[in-house]
Amino acid sequence: MQKFINVVALLSGLTSLALIAGSGYVLMNEGKWRAEAQEKLKDIIVDGIQDALPGLLDSAVPEALPTPPSMTGGAIPLP
């Protein structure tokens, strides 16, 4: 019975050490991971805007140089 209790105590200690080490690893690398995630998100947003922008501009901006009329009216008489 004593051996079983010793094994449980050893496993409990190892579990505690693993949790402490894992938490330290996460806390030490949090800033780097956050910066990487922000950079990836920025790239995704920029790519999405660049893909959508030509279509939005084409529909929002009228033709800069309209086609000339095929026929004109008479001259305006001077008073």
Image: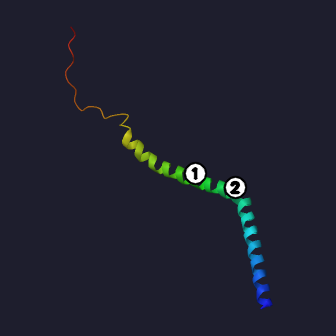
* Quarter of the figure with the C terminus: top left
Q: Check disc 2 and report the residue beneath it.
A: 31
Q: Quadrant of residue 70?
A: top left
Closest to the observer: 27 or 39? Answer: 27
Q: Amino acid at mark 1?
A: Lys
- Marks 2/1 in contact by CB < 8 Å: the verdict is no
Task: Name the residue nearer the viewer: 40 or 71.
Answer: 40
Eyeballing the image, is 3 above or below 30? Answer: below
Whole-angstrom CA distance, mark 2 to mark 1, is 16 Å
**Front residue of this view, candidates 51 and 72:** 51
Residue with the most extreme top position: 79
Q: Which type of secondary structure does the marked residue at label 2 adopt?
A: helix
Could you tell whether 2 is left or right of 36 in the image?
Answer: right
User: At x 53% / y 51%, what residue is drawn?
Assistant: 45
- Image quadrant occupied by the N terminus: bottom right
Task: Please tell me in which quadrant of the rendered image residue 13 appears.
Answer: bottom right
Measured from the top left, where is residue 11 in percent x and y?
Answer: 75, 80
Query: Furthest residue to the front?
Result: 1
Q: Nearer the viewer, residue 56 or 4?
A: 4
Instruction: State the residue at coordinates (20%, 24%).
Output: 73
